[in-house]
């Protein structure tokens, strides 16, 4: 009788140890997956931030070109106007 109880306890202890090992492995796998997802999320955020900065730089560059073109156009118009006035008067 004692032997059966001891055998049952040994089996239960071994079963509990295996369950604890499986739980630890699952926890480690979940932590690895979470760390990987976090790294991917951070990389995506960095990529998106860089893309947004590139878009903003392009927009700023385009605005600067438009302003410079407009200034050049006005300067040329003023030059033609001054030349015409000089010929007339």
Image (spheres, rainbow, N blue to C red):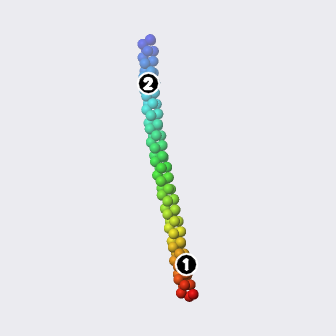
Return the residue nearer the eye: 49 or 76.
76
User: Up-down: is 43 above or below 87?
Assistant: above
Q: What is the quadrant of the C terminus in the image?
A: bottom right
Q: Residues within 10 Å of mark 1 (few under 14, many from 20)?
A: few
Residue at (44, 42) in percent of width and height = 36
Quarter of the figure with residue 77? bottom right
> x%, y% of residue 70?
53, 72
Residue at (53, 72) in percent of width and height = 71
Q: Which mark is residue 78?
A: 1
Judging by the rendered image, the residue that carries numbered circle 2 is: 17
Quarter of the figure with residue 18? top left
Return the residue nearer the eye: 17 or 10.
17
Q: Which mark is residue 19?
A: none
Of the residues tagged 2 and 1, which is closer to the observer? 1
- What distance separates the C-alpha of mark 2 from that of mark 1? 90 Å
SS at circle 1:
helix
Looking at the rendered structure, the number of numbered marks drawn on it comes to: 2
User: Up-down: is 32 above or below 58?
Assistant: above
């Amino acid at each position: 009788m004692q032997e059966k109880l001891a055998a049952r306890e040994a089996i239960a202890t071994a079963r509990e140890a295996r369950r604890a090992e499986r739980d630890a492995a699952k926890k480690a796998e979940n932590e690895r997956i979470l760390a990987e997802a976090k790294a991917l999320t951070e990389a995506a955020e960095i990529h998106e931030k860089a893309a947004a900065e590139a878009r903003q730089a392009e927009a700023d560059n385009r605005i600067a070109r438009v302003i410079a073109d407009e200034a050049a156009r006005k300067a040329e118009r003023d030059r033609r106007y001054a030349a015409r006035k000089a010929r007339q008067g």
